[in-house]
Image (cartoon, rainbow, N blue to C red):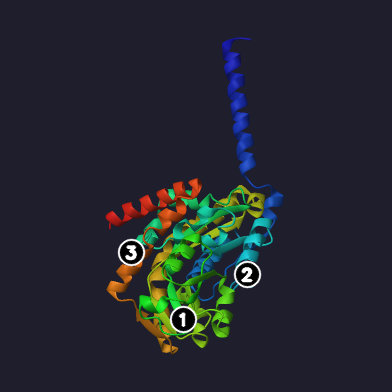
Amino acid sequence: MNFTDIGIRLRAGIAGCAALALLAAVPSPAQAQQTYVMKISVPTIHDIPNDWIAGFAQAVEKNSGGRIKPQIFPASQLGSIPRQIEGTQFGAIQIQLIPPEFMVGLDPRFQLLAALGLVDSDKQAQRLAADPSVRKLMLGLGANKGLHGIGLFFAEPQELISRTPLRTLADFKGKKIRIFASPFQTEAFERLGMTPVAMTLGDVVPGLQEGTLDAAITGIGPIVGFHMVDAAKYVTRIGQPQIFIIAEASRKWFDSLPKDLQQVIEKAAAHEDEVINAIADKVSGTQLEKWQKAGGSLFHLSAADHAKMMKIVGDVGTQVASKNPALDAGYKIVTQAARTLASAK
């Protein structure tokens, strides 16, 4: 055999491999006809994450040619946040949207965006959620926990809703407050003289109604969407911390999809992460108006009290993160990105 023959055979072999790879990427007739149910779970209702889901579900169904059938379950219809997380890990739920810090039990780095003082404006928060280094870190955290991150976006600042008026920092003292599941928030609100209790959204209204809670931090969207004015009539705008939302797919389910459908899902999620910002800007203002029209009162901390609060909690993130090497490394990535974005505004 001469070198020409060898070259012909090599080229034929390479062409054959390429053809096989192409065939592997194209769905088989059975796969092309198969449909997949996509249950999407979220704790909120009539809120910014629900707007994200609406656009995402519509795009996925359209761009999959109807091969993926979305089913949307708002207001924790499929269970509390811990049950939603478990359901997504094991494949009973295909997509969940929650603040990432509620998954701190899976990996402490899920709380990285929950630190008070990380960002100081909605625009900076939106840019932080879009930062490539932050997205790579956050969306990859659940890979060995049965999760596949597909989306990350900023929703809204947290507000302080309370049974009695909390107009000043001095009013915070001794109050029992619901927080998200993050040591960053536990330490911060303890420093402010409060007793923090990590609690899912579904437990907030009963806690306020029964008096087991004096106050809670949550977004204005859930405050209005769950008609919390019936349980507590006062909202203090503290502007911290920010609420970010992560979209996680069940890895078991996602890996079972043909490659083309995986791409449909990831492209739709990335698109919604971008377009939700303009929607959120409008929704937040509308929700504040709805709160006041429903009979709720709205307070703002004075500039002096806000500055004092940030001085008290300013180093909480650094202090908490320093106790865990992986958390510390992640916190440095997130804070560096936040500082860069702040200087670029």
Determine the image quadrant of residue 22: top right
Q: Which amino acid type is shown beneath numbered disc 1? A: Ser
In front: mark 3 or mark 1?
3
Of the pair 182 and 337, the residue shown nearer to us: 182
Q: Which mark is residue 311?
A: 3
Q: Earlier in the sequence, mark 1 or mark 2?
A: 2
Residue under circle 2? 80
Q: Residue at x 28, y 73 (%)?
A: 303
Q: CA distance from mark 3 to mark 1?
A: 23 Å
In the structure shown, which secondary structural element does the residue marked by tag 1 occupy? strand
Query: Which quarter of the rendering shows the N terminus?
Result: top right
Instruction: Work out which residue is located at the far right of the displayed protein and give it.
Output: 30
The image shows residue 296 at horizontal and vertical percentages of 43, 86
Left or right, 96 with respect to 169, comes to: right
Answer whether residue 254 is visible to the viewer in this image: yes
Q: Residue at x 56, y 85 (%)?
A: 209
Residue under circle 1? 162
Q: CA distance from mark 1 to mark 2?
A: 22 Å
Of the pair 260 and 162, the residue shown nearer to us: 162
The image shows residue 172 at horizontal and vertical percentages of 42, 76
